[in-house]
Amino acid sequence: MIKIKDLIGIIPIRIGLSCLTLGVLLCGYLLFGKPLNSSSAEPVLFEVPKNSTISHLSKELHRKGLISFPLTFKLFVRVTGLGKRVRAGFYYLPPRNSVVEMAFKLSTGKMATQTV
């Protein structure tokens, strides 16, 4: 028969493992989750103004429906150092990108070009 004294040591471990699992799942969703409100598959022309901040870019990307989580984008770009590599210009950005994909597109992607 299982006694309550025996369960007291197991319960905090199970609670801790459950919290850790939920935390990992939440981080994965925030970083790799796709925007839910983007029904269009057409690329969006997005401008990165000169001297714009990562905070401003994250708000604009969210406003245009290109990312779902502006704070996650801002933190990811700052932690990885990709914010220093984002250059001013126009970019064709497909909707339905995760925060990680969008950060890499803005830091390593090609800018939009116009033929004359």
Image: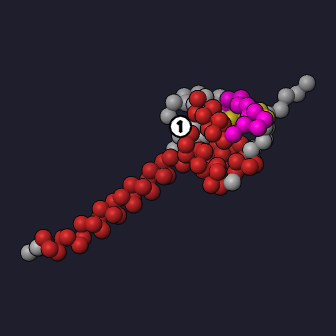
Identified at 65% across, 28% down, the residue is: 42
Identified at 53% across, 40% down, the residue is: 69
Where, quadrant-wise, is the N terminus in this rendering? Answer: bottom left
Residue 21 makes an appearance in the image: yes
Q: What type is the residue that disc 1 sits on?
A: Ser
Asked if residue 3 lies left or right of residue 105, the reply is left
Q: How far across and down, in percent of the image, does residue 6 sit?
A: 17, 75
Identified at 60% across, 45% down, the residue is: 74
Magenta stretch containing residue 42, yes or no?
Answer: no
Q: Which residues are magenta?
A: 43-53
| Snapshot quadrant of residue 114 | top right
User: Farthest residue toward the top?
Assistant: 116
**Residue at numbered disc 1:** 68
Residue 95 makes an appearance in the image: no
Helix, strand or loop status at disc 1: loop
Is the residue 114 above or below the residue 73 in the image?
Answer: above
Q: How far across and down, in percent of the image, does residue 4 sit?
A: 12, 70
Magenta stretch containing residue 50, yes or no?
Answer: yes
